[in-house]
Amino acid sequence: MRFRYKLEGRDTSWQEPGTRRQASYSDLRPGNYKFRVIASNNDGVRNEAGASLDFSIAPTWYQTNWFRILCIVFGVFIVWVIYRLRVRQIAKSIGARFDERLAERTRMARDLHDTFLQTIQGSKLVADDALEPSTDPVRMRRAMEQLSLWLGRAMQEGRAALNSLRTATTQGNDLADTLRSVTEDGLIPSPMTVTFSVIGDAKEIHPIVRDEVHRIGYEAIRNACTHSGASRLEVELGYADDLVLRVSDDGTGIDSAIADKGRIGHLGLQGMRERAARIGAKLTLRSSTSTGTEIKLVVPGDIIFRKMPVRRSHPR
């Protein structure tokens, strides 16, 4: 007896197994099937009706429609997350560039105020002094020479500002010298007595931090000379575990509202606080009508002092 079979839903034609009485399939997908078998005798006469068996194969969990839908939803979610991360990355990059540009503009405005505008203000004071009625030609010439000097300095500082202030205000480890020169620039009121002192041994200072300290000290000294009406000004620079700069006067003091928020249209105190925050320093301001004003800046030594390399000696 010979057999012929066909699995409807999978086979496209009849299979000829001969006398084998078994059929095996290993690649059936989920669905409904019908297995049909016909046989023939020794004379080759077939039973065309044959026999049939209907059966179905249930899908596994990863072959179900809900799993396919879940995969599609998950894929869309992943694409959305990637898109959002990309948008956030672009926004962060744009924000960083904006913050950098804003910080640069703020720095330039602060430096223009601390240098160029202060020099222009000094030039105006000299010019006002020269405009006072006088018959002394020597005094007039001295005033004009001082005005020429200050205008030349204004040109240099303006050119430096236009070059994005790339060069530090102080060169070398000369913080004490540059601060002392501020008290000797010719704009100190004649009734004011200036005392400058350095405590401790000078140390090597990071140039960027040194520049910020110089600008803070410059602004504090100029404010005391211009607005305090004091008769005595003390500038103290201390080298210890930390760097301490103290500028004090015995003037009329600063109004509490101005001390907190600064004077409208002026960036002096605000610029000093911004510079101190930039280098991780602590800036304190104490002022009263009876004792005057004291501005104290403390810069941590780990930030401002450079660590010199240790030289090891080798035996000969």
Image (spheres, helix red, strand yellow):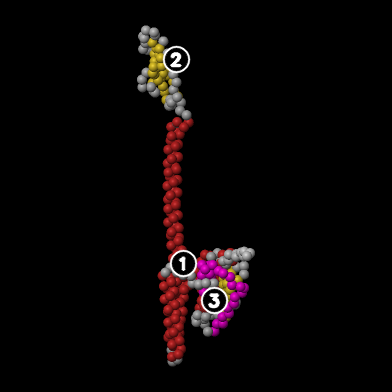
Q: CA distance from mark 1 to mark 2?
A: 93 Å
Q: Is residue 196 visible?
A: yes
Q: Quadrant of residue 150?
A: bottom left
Task: Write the residue at 43% across / 26% down.
Answer: 27
Q: On the image, numbered disc 1 is attached to which residue? A: 107
At which x and y percent is residue 156? Answer: 43, 75
Range of the magenta residues? 191-218
At which x and y percent is residue 83? Answer: 42, 47
Element type at mark 2? loop
Q: Which mark is residue 177?
A: 3
Of discs 1 and 3, which sits in the foreground?
3
Query: Which residue in the rendered view is the most extreme toward the front?
Result: 316
Q: Quadrant of residue 92?
A: bottom left
Task: Write the residue at 54% across / 84% down.
Answer: 191
Q: Earlier in the sequence, mark 1 or mark 3?
A: 1
Q: Quadrant of residue 294?
A: bottom right
Q: Which mark is residue 211?
A: none
Task: Write the residue at 52% across / 72% down.
Answer: 172
Q: On the image, numbered disc 2 is attached to which residue? A: 21
Q: Amino acid at mark 3?
A: Asp
* Residue toward you, 47 or 315: 315
Q: Dot 3: few (<14), some (14–19), or many (≥20) neighbours within 10 Å? A: few
Q: Is residue 292 visible?
A: no
At which x and y percent is residue 214? Answer: 52, 72
Asked if the stretch drawn in magenta spans residue 199, the answer is yes
Of discs 1 and 2, which sits in the foreground?
2
Task: Write the residue at 58% across / 64% down.
Answer: 309
Q: Amino acid at mark 2?
A: Arg
Q: Earlier in the sequence, mark 3 or mark 2?
A: 2
Q: Is residue 294 above or below residue 40?
A: below
